Amino acid sequence: MTSVPHLGGRIVPLGISLLQKYRYYLGMNSGVSPPVAPAIELRAAVRFPLRIPIVVTTESGDVSAMTVNISASGILFEELAAPLAVATAVSFTIPMPAEAMGTPTDVVVRCAGRVVRSTKNDGGWQAAAVIDEYQFSH
């Protein structure tokens, strides 16, 4: 929230039009609810849907999973039989088809990172991990 001087210094939500701010200011004494600002996406990288089976390696052993989406900085996978604790170190390999990568041959991406979220869903457990390192190979 920010204070807008030309609206009497009242605190109004960001991300809304000046007209909405003005109406909010005028309606303060009439019981009008403040306008709702649109949600802001805080992710730093674009996510791409990718559904492929992978094996996630942890200190406790290997775990089968299905990817949901991936970005340059993270991955979401699901169909885990058990939760992965937040901060668990993980590594995994993702085969990327040549057609998707625009390369003459398939590319293998080796990733290492850590779990930042683990939640239960209908198909088991889901985990999100930040990718700290990745390496491409053919």
Image (tube, helix red, strand yellow):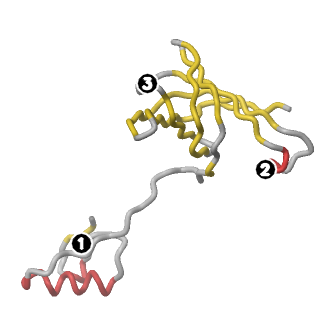
Q: Does 88 sit above or below residue 41?
A: above
The residue wearing badge 1 is 12
Q: In which quadrant will I find the N terminus?
A: bottom left
* Residue found 88% across the figure and 46% down from its top: 103
Q: In which quadrant will I find the C terminus?
A: top right
Amino acid type of the residue tagged 3 in the rendering: Ala
Residue 12 image offset from top left, x and y in percent: 24, 72
Amino acid type of the residue tagged 2 in the rendering: Ala
Cβ atoms at labels 1 and 3 below 8 Å apart: no
The residue wearing badge 2 is 100
> Residue 25 is drawn in which quadrant?
bottom left
Residue 119 image offset from top left, x and y in percent: 39, 36
Element at label 3:
loop
At label 2, counting other C-alpha atoms closer than 10 Å, the crowd grade (few under 14, some 14-19, many 20 or more) is few
* Residue found 63% across the figure and 44% down from its top: 51
Q: In the figure, is residue 86 to the left or right of 136?
A: left
Q: In the figure, is residue 9 to the left or right of 93?
A: left
Q: Does 63 sit above or below residue 124?
A: above
The residue wearing badge 3 is 82
Q: In whole angstroms, how far apart are the C-alphas of marks 3 and 2? A: 31 Å
Choose between 111 and 67: the one closer to the eye: 67
* Residue found 63% across the figure and 25% down from its top: 55
Residue 89 image offset from top left, x and y in percent: 52, 21
Residue extending farthest top? 60
Choose between 123 and 43: the one closer to the eye: 123
